[in-house]
Amino acid sequence: MKPKRIELLGVPVDCVNMSQALSAVEEMMRDDRPGMVVAVNPEKVIKARKNPALLAQLREARLLIPDGIGVVMAARLLGLGKMERVPGSELMPAICERAARKQYRIFLFGAGPEVNRDVMEALRRRFPGLRIVGGQHGYLKENEMPFLIDRINASGADVLFIALGSPKQELWLEQYLPRLKVKVCQGVGGTFDVLSGRVKRAPMFIRKMHLEWLYRLLSEPRRLLRQTALPRFAARVFWQFVIG
């Protein structure tokens, strides 16, 4: 069953929880055309409002997961629909766990050479039997992309995880998705860093308090500029709530 899709400040997002997101991924696995899984958080909402190409690409995605708690709370406040936070960093390993059981084939594209190698090894340890059929770091030139597309298609991969950061990974998918033979493509941002052990997620009690964004900001002060999107997002949501 297709998830309910809403418009939050003019940007689409699906009303799903983790179980429903995985069901949507399984539905894509049965389809003949590749499907895109994209995370939506307050930062991406602000970017998409200013970037018509990114907004158009989001509208083409098969699954738009509510990655940020701000998106979840805003949707509830505005009466648009009920959803639960589905972090991309949790959806990717959940897909890998299912892939190990069902023998789906995985290809990893993005991050630096060492991170790409390390996340491959970490996933194989965590999910015995996982079929990782290829990997490629993200530092490729544009003229090398046709060779990468050929490699991915020749590998027989069912699922492609792309860690190029946003909006680069979404725009990459917009350009190259029609040439891919995979079933599912998920943009995962910095998830390779997390799964490889280079970046620590917030402790569970902080995640349950929905303060992971604050933990990441305190851990990585260079994210401060990016986090300025949060008050702008909150202000726009509040204004939308006031004017109805």
Image (spheres, rainbow, N blue to C red):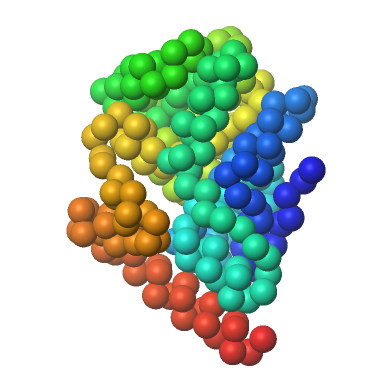
The image position of residue 230, as x and y in percent, is 40, 69
Residue at 52 percent across and 82 percent down: it is 238
The image position of residue 138, as x and y in percent, is 38, 29
Residue at 30 percent across and 29 percent down: it is 196
Residue 208 falls in image quadrant: bottom left
Residue at 30 percent across and 22 percent down: it is 118
Q: Quadrant of the C terminus?
A: bottom right
The image position of residue 111, as x and y in percent, is 34, 32
Marks counted in the figure total 0
Q: Horizontal placement of 140 versus 239: left or right?
A: left
Q: Horizontal placement of 15 versus 166: left or right?
A: right
On screen, residue 176 above or below 84? above
The image position of residue 66, as x and y in percent, is 55, 54
Say which of 241 and 107 sits in front. Answer: 241
Residue 207 falls in image quadrant: bottom left
On screen, residue 86 above or below 26? below
Say which of 150 and 105 sits in front. Answer: 105
Q: Horizontal placement of 30 versus 215: left or right?
A: right
Q: Is residue 179 visible?
A: no
Say which of 123 and 137 sits in front. Answer: 123
Residue at 66 percent across and 21 percent down: it is 181
On screen, residue 108 above or below 155? below
